[in-house]
Image (cartoon, rainbow, N blue to C red):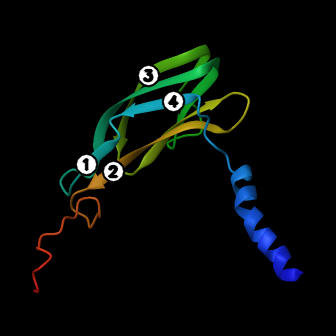
Amino acid sequence: MMPRALLLLFTLLPLTATLNTAVADESMRLSVKPVLCITDKRTPSCQMSFLVLWESAQTGYYCLFNDFGETPIRCWSDERSGRTEDERIVENDFQYWMQDDSSELQLAVVTVEVLRLDSDDRRRKRRTRHVWDVN
């Protein structure tokens, strides 16, 4: 009886975990351009202008946030879409997200990545030897 109860528990555990996590709203679209900053030893940061566009299936009160502060960058009232520009000096990865006034649920999220050319970043590593090289 005990193994059957454990099997049922492990079967339902992923279901309860997905029910409790905050899922982004599929009716909200968020677009940020550019989404990549490339740095090196001479320039450890990027001064960038981000174009942020969003669109929702429903009219509402929406606010744009990022990881740099707790206050919204901008809010829109009774809107289904919006656009803004955000000037930033970027040194590390960060996120933009949309939130409505009725909850703290992130409706849509976009991550801006920083690629460091002087580091051992896996995204820029390429195999320099042929597969058949023995050395």
| Left or right: 14, with 4 as reference point | left
Count residues near mark 3 (Cα–Cα under 10 Å), then give few for <14, some for 14-19, many for 20+.
Answer: few
Spatial CA span between label 2 and label 3 = 21 Å
Residue at 22% x, 64% y: name it: 125
Residue 34 in percent (x, y) is at: 32, 36
In the picture, measured across the screen, residue 58 lies left or right of residue 37, that is: right
Amino acid type at mark 4 = Arg
Between disc 4 and disc 3, whose residue precedes?
A: 4
Residue 47 or residue 15, whichever sits in front:
15
**N-terminal-most mark, 1 or 4:** 4
SS type, badge 3: strand
First along the sequence among labels 2 and 1:
1
Label pair 2/1, CB-CB below 8 angstroms? yes
Upstream in the sequence, badge 2 or badge 3? Answer: 3
The residue pinned by badge 3 equals 84
Q: Residue 35 sits in which quadrant?
A: top left
Q: Amino acid at mark 3?
A: Thr
The C terminus, quarter of image: bottom left
